[in-house]
Amino acid sequence: MKQIIVIGGGGMSREPDNLALDRYIIEQTVKPRPAVCFLPTASGDSPSLIVEFYTIFSQLGCRASHLPLFGPLPSDLESFILEQDVVYVGGGRTRNMLALWRDWGLEEILQKALEDGVILSGVSAGGICWFQQAVTMVSGNLSVLECLGFLDNSCCPHYDYQAERRSIYHKFIEQGDISPGYAIEDGVALHFADGKLQQVVKSRPEAQAYYVEKISGELIERPLESTYLLGD
């Protein structure tokens, strides 16, 4: 089964005292001590974020590692990725991250990992990257970005974080600048299996996710049924 778990915002970097979403990802491996690799590319391999990842995912009982594209790389990049149970991608600058991934051939390696059963996951930039298109910040403006296309449709994260995100995403869809897709508030994760949305889970009781599309000239924003995960 090909699994991708997308967090709109939150997770370990924003909610260190509420690891419900991160724990949910780990539980999908059905392994007592899964291997989890952190890709901190979007943050420029932020040292503090890497330390935070090791602290939290070790606490969750994982065999943690990370892949630094701004430092020494494993001798066999493909084998390193394929040995993982989960790839967890951090937030930051999506456009820069995708450019580096493509330069290092990671796009093809991650596609192979997905086919081989490695769970692909991430938050913010690390979540939207798996879709065909996404709304992201480019040069200070919210813009449409072409992404990896492992998942159909588009995605807009942080839907409740900045007031203009909702109106801009609606505008892009209405004008045909972006395909219909998923709007995700912070604290919500979408779990896809074999390309289909399987479950929506959340770490905050009030958080929500939506599917947004244009039907017969009318914009429709449909709330998605979700399950609240109790924290520690």
Image (cartoon, helix red, strand yellow):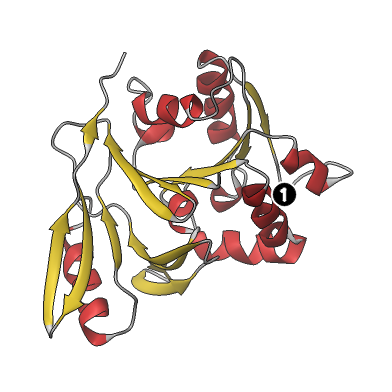
Q: Quadrant of residue 13?
A: top left
Q: Is residue 64 left or right of residue 89?
A: right
Tell me the quarter of the image containing the N terminus: top right
Q: Which of the two residues, 107 or 46, is positioned nearer the viewer here?
A: 107
Question: Where residue 80 sits in the image (x, y, percent)?
Answer: 78, 39
Q: Quadrant of residue 22?
A: top left
The vertical placement of 25 against 223, above or below, is: above
Q: Position of residue 12 (x, y in %)?
A: 42, 30
Residue at image position (25%, 77%) is: 173
The answer to whether 173 appears left or right of 137 in the picture is: left
Residue 100 in the image: state x and y as whole percent. Answer: 67, 62
The residue indicated by pointer 1 is 70
Q: Nearer the viewer, residue 196 or 17?
A: 196
Task: Tell me, yes or no, if residue 163 can be seen here.
Answer: yes
Look at 13% across and 36% down and name the residue there.
206
Left or right: residue 82 versus residue 25 is right
Q: Residue at x 68, y 30 (%)?
A: 65
**Left or right: 102 in relation to 127:** right
Please tell me whether mark 1 sits on a helix, a strand or a loop: loop
Q: State whether residue 199 is above or below residue 132.
A: above
Front-most of 41 and 36? 36
Q: The disc labelled 1 sits on which kind of residue?
A: Phe
